[in-house]
Amino acid sequence: MRASILLAAVAFTSQAPADLALAQDAANRSEAIGPSTHAHWINAPHSNEMVWPGFAFMAHMSGHVQLDCVIDSKGKLKPCAVIEDTPAGQGFAQAAIAFLAPTKMRPPTVDGAPVPDAHVQITLDFDGAQGGVRFMWRSQ
């Protein structure tokens, strides 16, 4: 048993300098390339600015919308594609797109430069019982 522990320790130490060198090389390349960032809001939407679809609001109906939007070079969201609109045909997708229209996002960066026409997925959940909206986003 003692021999197998010693053998494992020798194998670990013989690989450690090579792994350390690779890790250091990767860190050096990362510093040379520059930082990368995700998209983030310049002026985020506020849930109190949401205009609910008329019937859905009066019926206390909840909804879920997922959008795929493109951030242009000035931070505006280009027309968004509707990925999911539940329940369909109740106006939630149109309300979500109108809600996001005045907002701006800083596009993600790679090597310190903005990514042209970067995509961001935005999810909005309409809570009919509470009358509120919760939104999340994820850049790709």
Image (cartoon, rainbow, N blue to C red):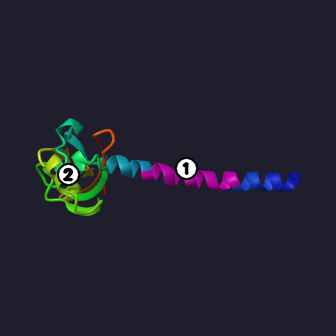
Quarter of the rendering occupied by the C terminus: bottom left
Expressed as whole percent of the image width and height from the top left, the position of residue 37 reads 30, 47
Amino acid identity at mark 1 = Leu
Expressed as whole percent of the image width and height from the top left, the position of residue 116 reads 18, 58
Taking 1 as reference, is 39 left or right?
Answer: left
| Near-viewer residue (20 or 118) | 118
Q: Most prominent secondary structure in the magenta stretch? A: helix
Q: Earlier along the polypeptide chain: callout 1 or callout 2?
A: 1
- Specify the quadrant of the image occupied by residue 130: top left
Q: How far apart are marks 1 and 2 (CA)?
A: 62 Å
The residue identified by callout 2 is 55
**Camera sees residue 138:** no
Q: Residue at x 23, y 51 (%)?
A: 56
What residue span does the magenta drawing correspond to?
Answer: 12-26
Amino acid identity at mark 2 = Phe
Expressed as whole percent of the image width and height from the top left, the position of residue 44 reads 21, 40
Task: Tell me if mark 1 has few (under 14), some (14-19) or many (20+) residues whose alpha carbon lies within 10 angstroms of its own.
Answer: few
Taking 78 as reference, is 82 left or right?
Answer: right
Instruction: Name the secondary structure under disc 2.
Output: helix
Residue 129 is labelled as none
Instruction: Name the secondary structure under disc 1.
Output: helix
**Camera sees residue 98:** yes
The residue identified by callout 1 is 20
Q: Which residue is drawn at 47% across and 48% down?
A: 24
